[in-house]
Image (spheres, rainbow, N blue to C red):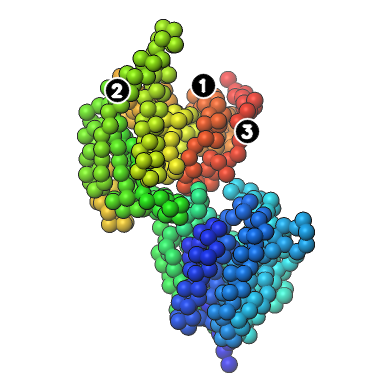
Amino acid sequence: MTRSIVIAAVQANPTVGAIAANEAQARLRLAEARAAGADLAVFPELFINGYPPEDLALKPAFWRAGQAAVERLALETDDTFAALVGVIWPAEGPGRRPRNGLAFLAGGRVQGVAFKSDLPNYGVFDEKRVFEPGEGPSVFTWKGVRLGVPICEDIWSSGVCAALAAQGAEILVAPNGSPYRRTADRERTGVARARVAETGLPLIYLNEVGGQDELVFDGASFALDARGREVMRLPMFEEAVGVMRWSEGPEGWTATGAPLAGWMDGPGEVYHAMVVGLRDYVNKSGFPGVLLGLSGGVDSAITAVVAADALGPDRVRCFMLPSRYTSRESLEDAEDCARRLGVRLDEIPISPAVDAFAGMLTPLFENRPPDLTEENIQARIRGLSLMALSNKLGSMLLTTGNKSEIAVGYATLYGDMCGGYNVLKDLYKTEVYEVCRWRNAHDPFGVAADPIPDRILTKPPSAELRPDQKDQDSLPEYADLDAILHGLVEEEASLDEIVDRGFPREMVERVQRLLYGSEYKRRQAAPGVKIGPKAFGRDRRYPIVNGFRDQVSKG
């Protein structure tokens, strides 16, 4: 008789700390999986508590609440239907940290808990700070099938999966909390195939979906049979339940009946990450909507578009705050963009406030000539005005600086850096244009076709804080700046290596100086969506006071 088991992979969207809501969501998904004929439902890593919990994981009341939730969820199981649910499991003994666990629920109770062995401590991860590692991997038996349960990082090296195979596991079920980055799907499938090849066992890779602070989880769950062939693929950036029947045959265990969704790539993938990150940050935080300054430039335009796609145009409000240096073209372009999106746009001229500050401060400036100070006053008046509107209206202010600007400090602290969230924080300026062009060619959420006027994409970028100002008056061309920054930030390349790529020594040294000198600004910047391999903040943690500077040794 052929052995088989029907497994439901639940790709769902928890909220960190919202244990009651996560429990309720799990209960609904359990019912859905049971109705679909599943024998076992599997949830992502730490689904009940939410991932990543950071130092919330050190709170004993938080452990106890999660444990109580899975004990209640166990009542939804019986002798025919079981579940694997991620949860923080309380510490054993005083002074011990809790563990990252996966509870096996069957027969109306918690039958056992598997613990994560390999705790990641790099990039955005700091699990060694808050968790005790498991003492060894676990195998659970259900419907006569032995299931090995490596948790997330446990599959990124061979040891845990090899140990599970040695314990007699027949199928590997790996729940994950793996944040989005551009290369994630290729890296995950490559690692999974390596484990399948080493063990000869099929592997179910289940990831969560949704936004949590600066991280976005893209889902993109999949399953490989014992020969490394994809037998399930769930969509990116969407909740889904993948039900698959695993049957043992001459070629080992293989699955049938599961969905094989197409996956995104390129700027479209990045755009969806931006939308999901903003949507969940706003909704999970309880804001009624967002507002932003719409300047007629490319950064604020794409931010407004992302907001409208994420929340709907009725929850987005834009403000144009012109000064005496604002061009007629910028006014027209902002109005055109707002009209295409269907968002409300109000105009608040800032000249009266600029004049008032001049009257207040000129006597104290001691006849010094105008300089960057007067430019920053304009930006800070805008920031003050937008924050006042945010306070009064209750909507969260979005800030619109891109990674290029944030990297070199081409942004005004307490001015255009004001805001609660930034969807462009991890996108270089050249990448902003790529995403804009993609969005103008696609309308994935049915909000607005071709939302960004062509002139916004073709005119030279300008802060418009002085007459005839252009970004390239102060910075290298963005193509050069972004390439140098990528070398310094993502690659940690030496100045010699970057100069060897054809960039002038003086330019490379200046960009390094600006990058290091702007760390204090970045520490005070709004959170934003992580897109690439090394985002400012949790990924890249440089000291503010930093006396090191690399040197060019050649020439």
The correct choice, above or below, for 397 with respect to 4 in the image is above
Residue occupying the point 63% across, 28% down: 546
Q: Contact, CB < 8 Å: mark 2 with mark 1?
A: no
Q: Secondary structure at mark 3?
A: loop
Q: Earlier in the sequence, mark 2 or mark 3?
A: 2
Residue occupying the point 51% across, 21% down: 506
The residue where tag 2 is placed is 352
In the image: residue 514, left or right of residue 157: left
Image quarter in which the N terminus is found: bottom right
Looking at the rendered structure, the kind of residue marked 2 is Pro
Residue 277 visible? The answer is no
3D distance between C-alphas at marks 2 and 1: 41 Å
Q: Nearer the viewer, mark 2 or mark 1?
A: 2
The correct choice, above or below, for 200 with respect to 475 in the image is below
Looking at the rendered structure, the kind of residue marked 1 is Glu
The residue where tag 1 is placed is 506
